Amino acid sequence: MYMPRKKNQQLKQNESVYTPLLQPTDLQQLTITQTMALLSLGRSKVYDLIKREGLPTTKIGSSTRIPLLDLKNWIEQHKTTKLA
């Protein structure tokens, strides 16, 4: 979501007309390869987590992406505790 600037406000050189309300990391979309590296898992395991464990994805054209914020939340929900 973006907020437009006031009409009388001057823009600096190379400055956008809109100011983002979200941080760039909130919108970051990871590729399968990036997710593999981040989780130290193989490609098949990442696709298995998507298919069987509900790892959240979005499609951008024909590309599958994993939203970073959703991945963090998914990991929190799937944490297990060790018994003493």
Image (cartoon, grey):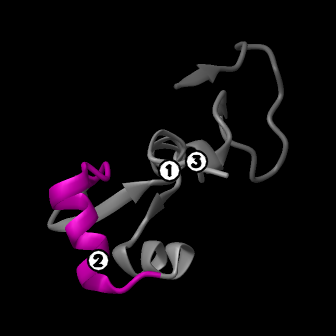
Q: Which residue is depicted at the point 50% across and 50% down?
A: 75
Q: Which of 66 and 78 is in front in this view?
A: 78
Q: How packed is label 2: few (under 14 Cα within 10 Å), some, or many (20 or more)?
A: few
Q: How packed is label 3: few (under 14 Cα within 10 Å), some, or many (20 or more)?
A: few
Q: Which of 15 and 59 is in front in this view?
A: 59
Q: Which residue is depicted at the point 24% across and 59% down?
A: 50
Q: Name the residue under label 1.
A: 75
For the residues labelled 2 and 3, say whether their Cβ atoms are less than 8 Å apart: no
4 relative to 29 in the view: left or right: right
Kindly indicate the quadrant of the structure image that contains residue 76: top right
The label on residue 5 is none
Query: Mark 1 and mark 3: span between their CA atoms?
Result: 13 Å
Q: What stretch is highlighted in magenta?
A: 41-58
Q: Is residue 60 visible?
A: no
Q: Name the residue under label 2.
A: 45
Is 43 part of what is drawn in magenta? yes
The label on residue 81 is 3
